[in-house]
């Protein structure tokens, strides 16, 4: 079974290798509701204090070359309550293919109705590194391998809007505006801005109060690209006394996700999720693990609690 799974990962890798020529894909996060800044620059500053979040994800645990993702995000209001700044650093790998993303985010915010509306822009760089020498090939002089660069650095932009109140939130964003193509003559990459290559992210959630310190928070994330099947993540969390979150989610393509969060104190939260593929891959993989740690530099009890949507 291990050999079959290794072959499957290799096939996926071969499919993914040309991706820099067509666009950029975002890493898969089960706890997307805790990593909003990575997909929407308008989220910057929404915690109303300096906030830092660390993520680590390993997919198809136990198999060499399986996807791994790490993320660090920092954001805060600056100068005034209308301006939020943030930064996201991500390191992603699958097989011989590795990327490092750096994105700076700016959000302009205003009060609207019973909540706050933010509009955001992001600018960053993506570094690609492909270890062609780690591949075992029959023809070492294959032009497909020898004429392709092993590493490169490319710019990108993002934009989004985000609205939140004490009961609900929603956001719409395009995390990567540029796509890339390969020049067939020189083998070099060149950037393109094509609407048909945009990846649209729509997310939202609503808090339902049941009383006696028990709440339910359903949420959804929809990823869509022109002429592609939309990916839908649906999640529902039961919140107990604003301290413990117990959640269950489902992603199309047969992925079942369980997640747990705990508020250790008013500044620190710890989260863990486990996802299992209900399709053919699940017969060989041992599931995917994800760990989240969030710290908000605030010290007063009367500030917004960590269940509220500026903090999700």
Image (tube, rainbow, N blue to C red):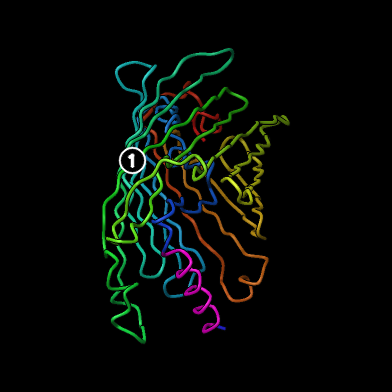
* In this rendering, position of residue 249 left or right of residue 118: right
Instruction: Residue lying at the far bottom in this picture: please name it.
Output: 138
* Magenta residues (range): 2-17
Which residue is nearer to you in this view: 47 or 299? 47
Which residue bears the numbered disc 1? 103
Determine whether the residue tagged by mark 1 lies in a helix, strand or loop.
Answer: strand
* In this rendering, position of residue 137 left or right of residue 1: left
Which residue is nearer to you in this view: 312 or 228? 228
Query: Where is residue 147 drawn, in percent x and y?
Result: 28, 69
Query: Where is residue 272 drawn, in percent x and y?
Result: 52, 53
Is 138 above or below relative to 188? below
Residue 6, magenta (yes or no) = yes
Is 310 above or below relative to 138? above
- The quadrant in which residue 258 appears is bottom right
Q: Residues within 10 Å of mark 1 (few under 14, many from 20)?
A: many
The residue depicted at 44 percent of the width and 54 percent of the height is 22
The residue depicted at 36 percent of the width and 65 percent of the height is 97
Residue 171, magenta (yes or no) = no
* In this rendering, position of residue 30 left or right of residue 22: right
Query: Where is residue 68 drawn, in percent x and y?
Result: 42, 62
Q: Main secondary structure of the magenta part?
A: helix
Which residue is nearer to you in this view: 275 or 265? 275
Query: Where is residue 285 drawn, in percent x and y?
Result: 56, 72
Question: Which quadrant is the N terminus positioned in?
Answer: bottom right
């Amino acid at each position: 079974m291990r050999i079959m799974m290794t072959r499957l990962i290799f096939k996926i890798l071969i499919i993914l290798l040309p991706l820099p020529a067509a666009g950029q894909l975002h890493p898969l996060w089960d706890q997307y509701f805790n990593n909003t800044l990575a997909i929407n620059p308008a989220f910057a500053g929404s915690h109303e204090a300096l906030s830092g979040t660390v993520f680590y994800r390993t997919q198809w645990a136990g198999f060499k070359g399986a996807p791994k993702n790490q993320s660090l995000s920092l954001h805060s209001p600056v100068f005034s309550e209308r301006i939020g700044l943030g930064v996201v650093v991500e390191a992603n790998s699958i097989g011989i293919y590795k990327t490092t993303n750096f994105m700076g985010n700016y959000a302009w915010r205003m009060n609207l109705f019973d909540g706050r509306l933010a509009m955001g822009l992001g600018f960053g760089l993506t570094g690609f590194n492909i270890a062609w020498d780690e591949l075992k090939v029959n023809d070492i002089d294959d032009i497909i391998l020898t004429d392709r660069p092993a590493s490169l650095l490319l710019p990108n932009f993002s934009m989004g809007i985000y609205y939140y109140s004490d009961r609900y939130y929603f956001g719409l964003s395009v995390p990567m505006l540029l796509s890339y193509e390969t020049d067939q003559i020189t083998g070099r990459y060149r950037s393109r801005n094509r609407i048909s290559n945009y990846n649209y992210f729509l997310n939202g959630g609503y808090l339902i109060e049941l009383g006696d310190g028990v709440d339910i928070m359903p949420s959804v994330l929809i990823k869509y690209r022109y002429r592609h099947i939309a990916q839908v993540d649906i999640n529902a969390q039961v919140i107990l006394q604003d301290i413990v979150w117990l959640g269950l989610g489902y992603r199309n393509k047969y992925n079942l996700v369980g997640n747990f969060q705990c508020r250790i104190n008013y500044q620190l939260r710890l989260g863990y999720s486990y996802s299992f593929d209900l399709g053919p891959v699940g017969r060989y993989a041992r599931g995917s693990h994800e760990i989240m740690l969030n710290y908000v530099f605030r010290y007063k009890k009367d500030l917004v609690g960590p269940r509220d949507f500026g903090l999700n």
